[in-house]
Amino acid sequence: MSRVVEIARGWIGTPYRHQASCNGAGTDCLGLIRGVWRDLLGPEPAQVPAYSMDWSEPQGEERLWAAAMAHLVPRAGRAQQAGDVVLFRMRSGAVAKHLGIVSVPHESFIHAYTRRGVIESSMSQPWARRIVARFAFPDRSG
Protein backbone atom coordinates (compact mmCIF):
# COMPACT_ATOMS: atom_id res chain seq x y z
CA MET A 1 0.00 0.00 0.00
CA SER A 2 1.11 3.56 -0.71
CA ARG A 3 2.48 5.42 2.33
CA VAL A 4 0.26 8.39 1.37
CA VAL A 5 -2.84 6.15 1.40
CA GLU A 6 -1.80 4.61 4.71
CA ILE A 7 -1.49 8.07 6.28
CA ALA A 8 -4.75 9.30 4.74
CA ARG A 9 -6.67 6.25 5.98
CA GLY A 10 -5.45 7.12 9.47
CA TRP A 11 -7.57 10.29 9.18
CA ILE A 12 -10.84 8.44 8.40
CA GLY A 13 -13.47 9.33 10.97
CA THR A 14 -12.04 12.81 11.65
CA PRO A 15 -14.99 15.24 11.77
CA TYR A 16 -15.39 17.95 9.14
CA ARG A 17 -14.24 21.36 10.41
CA HIS A 18 -13.78 24.24 7.97
CA GLN A 19 -10.12 25.46 7.87
CA ALA A 20 -8.97 22.83 10.39
CA SER A 21 -6.18 20.26 9.94
CA CYS A 22 -6.01 18.12 13.08
CA ASN A 23 -6.33 14.35 12.82
CA GLY A 24 -9.15 13.10 15.04
CA ALA A 25 -10.34 16.60 15.97
CA GLY A 26 -11.37 18.21 12.68
CA THR A 27 -10.37 18.93 9.10
CA ASP A 28 -11.62 20.03 5.72
CA CYS A 29 -10.39 18.68 2.39
CA LEU A 30 -7.41 21.03 2.24
CA GLY A 31 -6.62 20.29 5.88
CA LEU A 32 -6.47 16.57 5.07
CA ILE A 33 -3.87 17.20 2.35
CA ARG A 34 -1.95 19.49 4.72
CA GLY A 35 -2.01 16.83 7.45
CA VAL A 36 -0.81 14.09 5.12
CA TRP A 37 1.98 16.46 3.96
CA ARG A 38 3.11 16.99 7.57
CA ASP A 39 3.09 13.26 8.34
CA LEU A 40 4.88 12.41 5.10
CA LEU A 41 7.27 15.33 4.55
CA GLY A 42 7.42 17.49 7.68
CA PRO A 43 6.51 21.17 8.02
CA GLU A 44 4.08 22.63 5.49
CA PRO A 45 5.72 24.58 2.65
CA ALA A 46 3.53 27.68 3.12
CA GLN A 47 1.13 29.20 5.59
CA VAL A 48 -2.48 28.86 4.46
CA PRO A 49 -4.41 32.13 4.76
CA ALA A 50 -7.92 32.11 6.22
CA TYR A 51 -10.56 31.28 3.62
CA SER A 52 -14.34 31.36 3.47
CA MET A 53 -16.60 28.54 2.27
CA ASP A 54 -16.98 30.30 -1.10
CA TRP A 55 -13.32 31.31 -1.31
CA SER A 56 -12.06 32.35 -4.71
CA GLU A 57 -15.49 31.85 -6.31
CA PRO A 58 -16.51 35.54 -6.40
CA GLN A 59 -13.22 36.40 -8.12
CA GLY A 60 -13.23 33.27 -10.30
CA GLU A 61 -9.62 32.59 -9.33
CA GLU A 62 -8.19 29.06 -9.33
CA ARG A 63 -6.32 29.60 -6.06
CA LEU A 64 -6.37 25.97 -4.95
CA TRP A 65 -5.13 24.79 -8.34
CA ALA A 66 -2.35 27.41 -8.29
CA ALA A 67 -1.28 26.34 -4.79
CA ALA A 68 -1.24 22.68 -5.86
CA MET A 69 0.92 23.58 -8.87
CA ALA A 70 3.33 25.44 -6.58
CA HIS A 71 3.76 22.69 -3.98
CA LEU A 72 2.80 19.35 -5.53
CA VAL A 73 4.01 17.52 -8.65
CA PRO A 74 1.53 17.61 -11.58
CA ARG A 75 0.59 14.21 -13.04
CA ALA A 76 -0.15 13.88 -16.75
CA GLY A 77 -2.69 11.58 -18.35
CA ARG A 78 -5.74 9.90 -16.90
CA ALA A 79 -4.13 6.87 -15.23
CA GLN A 80 -4.51 7.26 -11.48
CA GLN A 81 -2.01 5.99 -8.94
CA ALA A 82 -2.62 5.26 -5.27
CA GLY A 83 -1.62 8.35 -3.33
CA ASP A 84 -2.42 10.85 -6.10
CA VAL A 85 -4.02 14.09 -4.96
CA VAL A 86 -7.06 14.79 -7.11
CA LEU A 87 -8.59 18.23 -7.60
CA PHE A 88 -12.32 18.42 -8.33
CA ARG A 89 -14.52 21.08 -9.92
CA MET A 90 -17.83 20.56 -8.16
CA ARG A 91 -19.95 22.58 -10.61
CA SER A 92 -19.48 23.41 -14.26
CA GLY A 93 -18.07 26.92 -14.57
CA ALA A 94 -17.09 27.11 -10.89
CA VAL A 95 -13.54 27.15 -9.56
CA ALA A 96 -11.98 23.83 -8.58
CA LYS A 97 -12.05 23.63 -4.80
CA HIS A 98 -12.32 20.09 -3.52
CA LEU A 99 -9.41 17.71 -2.92
CA GLY A 100 -9.04 14.02 -2.28
CA ILE A 101 -6.42 11.28 -2.28
CA VAL A 102 -6.75 8.27 -4.58
CA SER A 103 -6.77 5.13 -2.42
CA VAL A 104 -7.50 2.47 -5.06
CA PRO A 105 -6.94 3.76 -8.61
CA HIS A 106 -10.23 4.30 -10.47
CA GLU A 107 -12.13 2.74 -7.55
CA SER A 108 -11.95 4.90 -4.41
CA PHE A 109 -10.56 8.04 -2.81
CA ILE A 110 -10.26 9.59 0.66
CA HIS A 111 -11.55 13.10 1.32
CA ALA A 112 -13.05 15.35 3.98
CA TYR A 113 -16.64 16.06 3.08
CA THR A 114 -19.06 18.52 4.66
CA ARG A 115 -21.30 16.86 7.27
CA ARG A 116 -19.53 13.50 6.75
CA GLY A 117 -15.95 14.10 7.87
CA VAL A 118 -13.05 12.13 6.42
CA ILE A 119 -14.40 9.18 4.47
CA GLU A 120 -13.32 6.79 1.75
CA SER A 121 -15.72 7.12 -1.19
CA SER A 122 -16.24 5.23 -4.41
CA MET A 123 -14.64 6.92 -7.41
CA SER A 124 -18.03 6.82 -9.13
CA GLN A 125 -18.61 8.47 -12.51
CA PRO A 126 -20.12 11.60 -10.90
CA TRP A 127 -16.87 12.04 -8.93
CA ALA A 128 -14.49 10.94 -11.69
CA ARG A 129 -15.90 13.36 -14.26
CA ARG A 130 -15.28 16.27 -11.86
CA ILE A 131 -11.51 15.66 -11.66
CA VAL A 132 -9.66 18.52 -13.33
CA ALA A 133 -6.08 17.78 -12.21
CA ARG A 134 -3.95 15.19 -10.46
CA PHE A 135 -0.81 15.69 -8.41
CA ALA A 136 1.74 13.71 -6.41
CA PHE A 137 3.43 14.67 -3.19
CA PRO A 138 7.07 15.60 -3.86
CA ASP A 139 9.67 12.92 -3.27
CA ARG A 140 12.00 14.11 -0.53
CA SER A 141 13.84 10.81 -0.09
CA GLY A 142 16.99 11.81 -1.82
Image (spheres, grey):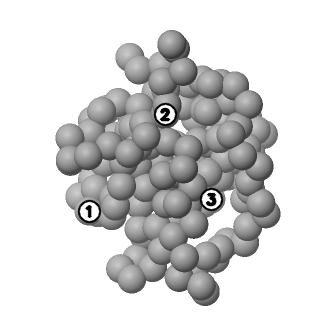
Q: Is residue 41 above or below residue 129?
A: above
At label 2, counting other C-alpha atoms closer than 10 Å, the crowd grade (few under 14, some 14-19, many 20 or more) is some
> Residues at badges 3 and 2 in contact (C-beta under 8 Å)?
no
Dot 2: element: loop
Residue at numbered disc 2: 137
Residue type highlighted by circle 1: Arg
For mark 3, what is the residue?
A: 115
Residue in view at x 65 percent, y 74 percent:
55
Residue 96 lies left or right of residue 47; in this view the side is left
Location of the N terminus (image quadrant): top left
In percent of width and height, residue 85 lies at 44, 43
- Please state if 7 lies on the left or on the right of 86 as rendered: right
Disc 2/disc 1 C-alpha distance (Å) = 22 Å
Q: Badge 3: how crowded within 10 Å, few (<14), some, or many (20+)?
A: few
Residue 129: image tag: 1
The kind of residue tagged 3 is Arg
Image-based side of 125 in relation to 141, left or right: left
Q: Secondary structure at mark 3?
A: loop
Task: Please count the marks in the image.
Answer: 3
